[in-house]
């Protein structure tokens, strides 16, 4: 039953509970605000508002002449109406629960999305992107209220173009999954949202002088970055595959490194033959260890090393100082391209190079990849031995009188 008597604090105090059921009293100032009085005597403020095409009763709080008055209810109701009209979560914050989730919000749907996509190898990176860039901006909004303008503003606020594109791509994938669950959403809001142009493909390859200067600077860097850089050059594997490796992945006696499918970028397990120099780098890192990370993070032994930006900037600066000239910017991934280019220069077959890099595209993609099951184990081993020998020559070459020489036995050991 609904009574149209208007609300004042004096009237609220005088309302008597009905014999059975409940009765609601309308407020004259805030549309939709009501006081519900039950047969138990409880007096509760509610807001009746149409959300998503249907009327909903949103509980505000119990009436209390000192703690929650009519003025408090009106203030809270107005704020809630404003949130609803802006497309935000219509549930009062008090009722959202400890995790702050309500059905239909971006944040709540993302929790379901993580469960649905838990088998994705990249789900941890997807979660990191949402937690850092998406949830703080639109996590409390109703997912079906997000527009392409909202997505554009979010992406436009990310300074790094590469990350901005990554956020846009992950949001688009999320909405492709969410759309069948959102009746009012007619199109993926990411489809026509702005995003930074795709950066040109990098083709940076280090010169022999730069390789030598880089190796020299790595010898001055303690673990994890010094040994990690040398392992990147010797194995040609990806940064995260090296720096997040587990000790159990290495077989030093068998001179092999098995990167499990769960850690490989393409989801395919990968066996990397280890050259003598790579084994020499690994031995002091592993010693008698049988588990844990090769490069454990400080204070978090279960995680791999992090903090690459500052360390890599320091290494690049050392290279430039050693060469006594400006050096074009290069990344850790450029070391992988440098090694692949070096293998081609040494006459290594392209399919062997791709096998070392664990690429499943190119000559190993499509129908060829289905029927070509040869793993090039011996060829990869021979190729990485040849690359090790090439590195030794590059590191020991006399590019300048001031450059240090390296003994031929192990490129990680500088000559006296």
Image (tube, rainbow, N blue to C red):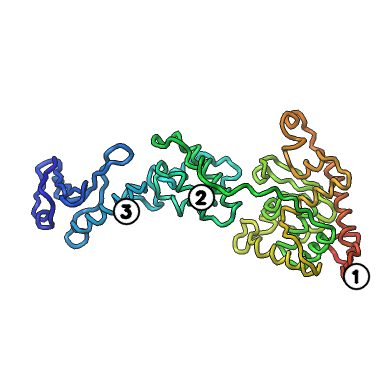
Please report whichever mark, 1 or 2, sits nearer to the chain's N-terminal start.
2
Q: Secondary structure at mark 2?
A: helix
User: Is the residue under label 1 in contact with that under label 3 (CB below 8 Å)?
Assistant: no
Place residue 180 in its image quadrant.
top left
Residue 126 vertical position relative to residue 411 in the rendered view, above or below: above
Q: Is residue 389 left or right of residue 29?
A: right
The residue that mark 3 highlights is 94
Which is closer to the viewer, label 2 or label 3?
2
Q: Which mark is residue 401?
A: 1
Place residue 49 in its image quadrant.
top left
Q: Secondary structure at mark 3?
A: helix
Please report whichever mark, 3 or 1, sits nearer to the chain's N-terminal start.
3
Residue 319 vertical position relative to residue 203 in the rendered view, above or below: below
Q: Position of residue 141 (x, y in %)?
A: 40, 48
Local packing at callout 3 (Cα closer than 10 Å; few below 14, some 14-19, many 20+) is few
| Quadrant in the picture for the C terminus | bottom right
């Amino acid at each position: 039953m609904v009574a149209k008597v208007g609300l004042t604090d004096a009237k609220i105090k005088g309302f008597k509970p009905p014999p059975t059921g409940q009765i609601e009293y309308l407020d004259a100032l805030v549309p939709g605000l009501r006081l519900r009085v039950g047969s138990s005597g409880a007096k509760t403020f509610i807001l009746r508002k149409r959300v998503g095409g249907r009327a909903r009763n949103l509980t505000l709080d119990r009436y209390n002449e000192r703690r929650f008055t009519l003025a408090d209810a009106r203030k809270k109701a107005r704020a809630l109406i404003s949130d609803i009209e802006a497309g935000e979560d219509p549930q009062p914050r008090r009722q959202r629960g400890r995790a702050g989730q309500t059905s239909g919000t971006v944040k709540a749907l993302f929790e379901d999305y993580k469960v649905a996509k838990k088998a994705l190898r990249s789900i941890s990176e997807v979660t990191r992107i949402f937690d850092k860039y998406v949830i703080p901006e639109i996590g409390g909004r109703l997912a079906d209220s997000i527009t392409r303008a909202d997505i554009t503003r979010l992406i436009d606020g990310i300074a790094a173009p590469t990350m901005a594109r990554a956020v846009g791509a992950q949001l688009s994938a999320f909405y492709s999954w969410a759309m069948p669950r959102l009746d009012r959403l007619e199109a993926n809001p990411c489809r026509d949202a702005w995003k930074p142009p795709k950066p040109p493909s990098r083709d940076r390859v280090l010169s022999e002088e730069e390789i030598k200067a880089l190796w020299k600077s790595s010898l001055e860097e303690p673990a994890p970055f010094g040994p990690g850089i040398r392992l990147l050059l010797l194995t040609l594997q990806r940064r995260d595959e090296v720096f997040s490796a587990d000790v159990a992945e290495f077989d030093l006696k068998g001179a092999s490194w098995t990167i499990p499918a769960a850690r490989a970028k393409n989801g395919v397990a990968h066996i990397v033959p280890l050259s003598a120099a790579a084994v020499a780098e690994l031995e002091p890192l592993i010693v008698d260890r049988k588990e844990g990370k090769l490069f454990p993070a400080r204070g978090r032994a279960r995680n791999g090393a992090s903090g690459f930006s500052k360390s890599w900037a320091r290494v690049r600066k050392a290279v430039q100082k050693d060469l006594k000239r400006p050096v074009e910017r290069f990344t850790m991934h450029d070391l992988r391209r440098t090694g692949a280019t070096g293998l081609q220069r040494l006459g290594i077959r392209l399919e062997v190079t791709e096998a070392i890099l664990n690429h499943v595209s190119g000559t190993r993609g499509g129908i060829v990849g289905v029927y070509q099951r040869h793993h090039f184990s011996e060829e990869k081993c021979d190729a990485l031995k040849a690359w090790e020998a090439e590195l030794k020559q590059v590191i020991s070459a006399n590019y300048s009188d001031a450059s240090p020489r390296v003994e031929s036995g192990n490129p990680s050991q500088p000559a006296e």
